[in-house]
Image: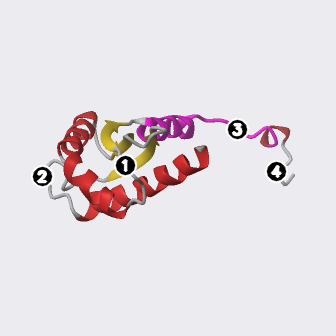
Amino acid sequence: MSYRIDRVNEEIKKELSLLIANEIKDYRIRDAIITIVKVDCSRDFNYAKVYISVLGDEKKRDEAAKALNDAKGFLRRGLGQVLKTFHTPELKFIADDTLEYGAKINEILKGLDIKDSGDDNGSNSSN
């Protein structure tokens, strides 16, 4: 059963990405770069949590999640036309900041001055 849920999650992720990019004309997400990070569908396929990441600040991320939740009926209908399941899940969009958090940690790590242990032995000197 888990394999089927994983396949449906990936299909939902792919189709929602296309619908959001091509069909949604809401001013709150018109200029936003939205990425669907993860879809978590219930075992009975009645509900799906859709985790999104938005490039920008927290306000922009929350606005995009609200706009997508406002359009979830439209998105669910579009999803129902392509999914091969008995039920089209009810969608809930959740703003996720893990990508931004990871980028922030990466920048912090880049800023640290860490020397490679091989460089401390003077093995690179040409004396």
Residue 96 drawn above or below residue 75: above
Mark 3 vs mark 2: which is more N-terminal?
Answer: 2
User: Given this view, does label 3 or label 2 mark the residue nearer the observer?
Assistant: 2
Q: How many C-alpha atoms fall within 10 Å of the one at disc 4: few (<14), some, or many (≥20)? A: few
Please report the residue visible at 57 percent of the width from the left and 34 percent of the height from the top.
Answer: 112
Mark 1 vs mark 4: which is more N-terminal?
Answer: 1
Q: Is most of the magenta stretch helix, strand or loop? A: helix
Q: Do residues under tags 2 and 1 come within 8 Å of each other at their CB atoms?
A: no
Q: Do residues under tags 1 and 4 come within 8 Å of each other at their CB atoms?
A: no
Quickly name the residue at label 3. Answer: 115
Q: How many C-alpha atoms fall within 10 Å of the one at disc 3: few (<14), some, or many (≥20)? A: few
96 left or right, relative to 19: right
Q: How many C-alpha atoms fall within 10 Å of the one at disc 1: few (<14), some, or many (≥20)? A: few
Q: Do residues under tags 3 and 4 come within 8 Å of each other at their CB atoms?
A: no
Please report the residue visible at 36 percent of the width from the left and 63 percent of the height from the top.
Answer: 82
59 or 121: nearer the viewer: 59
53 or 45: nearer the viewer: 45
Quickly name the residue at label 1. Answer: 87
Q: Secondary structure at mark 1?
A: loop
Spatial CA distance of label 4 from label 2 is 57 Å
Quickly name the residue at label 2. Answer: 27
The amino acid pointed to by label 1 is: His
Spatial CA distance of label 2 from label 1 is 30 Å
Quickly name the residue at label 4. Answer: 124
Q: Position of residue 68 (x, y in %)?
A: 23, 45
